[in-house]
Image (cartoon, rainbow, N blue to C red):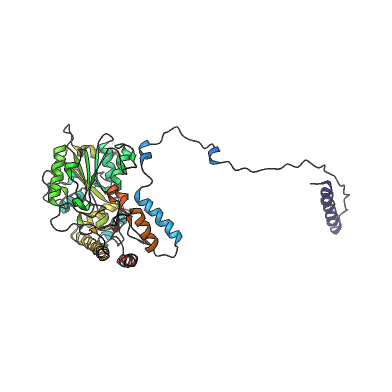
Amino acid sequence: MSVLQHTHIAASLSSSTSSFFAQNGFDVPRTQIVSVPPKKAVVCKCVATSPAEQTAYKTKVSRNGNIAKLQAGYLFPEIGRRKAAHMLKYPDAQVISLGIGDTTEPIPDVITSAMAKRALGLSTVEGYSGYGAEQGEKELRARLASAFYANLGIEEDDIFVSDGAKSDISRLQVLFGSNVTMAVQDPSYPAYVDSSVIMGQTGEFQKDVEKFANIEYMKCTPENDFFPDLSKVSRTDIIFFCSPNNPTGSAASREQLIQLVKFAKDNGSIIVYDSAYAMYVSGDTPKSIFEIPGAKEVAIETASFSKYAGFTGVRLGWTVVPKELKYSDGFPVAKDFNRIVCTGFNGASNIAQSGGLACLSPQGLEAMREVVGFYKENTQIIVDTFTSLGFKVYGGKDAPYVWVHFPGQSSWDVFSEILEKTHVVTTPGSGFGPAGEGFVRVSAFGHRNNVLEACRRFKELYK
């Protein structure tokens, strides 16, 4: 600031001050103008510090190297990310999701009313309950045994109630530890492979073959009726097997499961049998691995209410570990699994377990069959649509998934084209394993009007 500017400001202040005193009857003070010598101007420059130059605090704890092996994000969150980006691009579009296998229809009233009663009871002295048995309520375990395993030799204390099959898959991986070898169907539910990687059971991801080292990928394609050629499968400690299969929708026949149990016995392996879609099975196709003689000596079964009663948000499932299943030293596997459950889990929600009991009542079982029937009708609509358009279509009979073949095309490219041109979300087959390349999974979980609209759009795209 210059001397002239200082003088002007001081004079202005002096004039206004004198006026104030005079108007209010005060003696006007004498004003003295003081000149402030100018200072040398200083220029301040703001410079942004790059992230690399910032010194954020870091701990001395190393990252889990096994998690660092995982490729990109888990499949379904990645689909969710792409869906969100699409909705930002087309804010007025009616996006229909037939991708992730999430139920859409309301939970039957006979089930929700039981949960509501239990929830309200918690506000009374008589109805309150705190921690329950980690393995699940005795009555629920008994009803599960009678409803799904009657005459199969499975007893209530073989059953561990949980917050869902997916959670139990990770608990089983903790049970097995990092020194076991693993086999999975290819394609298969991504949680099997990802949990194996996290536990340290695998080697690095091999980009040339799209596989992790040290995992036995059991190829399941139309050419082998979606059942692996076991003569070409190497021996592993653990075999993950899902039937009806997610994503292909195929269900293993009784003869095929007899082969699988024999293969496990011959190799001293343990089968982890994921039966999350068993209520969708029709005919003589087995709903449980324990329908196969000798399976109790080599198999564990996981299951869930999610796709039967709409419990994807409620969270309730169970795992069967028979007493007959033993390690190489003769120690019962169930005792170790019980220890895992008691250490890392306080039991399923008592409200959810009340819902489970209601599911297994005569009225609840009928209500679940109606829900399953609704989704199977959706499945048939989707199958008929793609078949009419000339596509090779698999699954759909015993599962709520339709496996559509797009030969010579990238699964992610097909996913992107369908999303861009029809605003319908599907699931790229390659996300389930290398044998899924060239396929897209279409889920039947959706409101009927949405399924019909999606199929109309498919017809417009591929007519």
| Image position of 74 (left or right of 151) | right
Could you tell me which residue is drawn at 82 percent across and 43 percent down? 36
Q: Quadrant of the C terminus?
A: bottom left
In this view of the protein, which residue sits in the foreground, 366 or 285? 285
| Image position of 36 (left or right of 164) | right
| Image position of 353 (left or right of 33) | left
Could you tell me which residue is drawn at 86 percent across and 47 percent down? 33
Using the image, determine if residue 92 lies above or below residue 313. Answer: below
In the rendering, at what x and y percent does residue 446 appear? 31, 62
Residue 193 in sight here: yes
In the rendering, at what x and y percent does residue 24 appear? 84, 58
Residue 131 in sight here: no
In this view of the protein, which residue sits in the foreground, 19 or 117? 19
Using the image, determine if residue 373 lies above or below residue 313. Answer: below
Using the image, determine if residue 110 lies above or below residue 127. Answer: below
In this view of the protein, which residue sits in the foreground, 160 or 188? 188
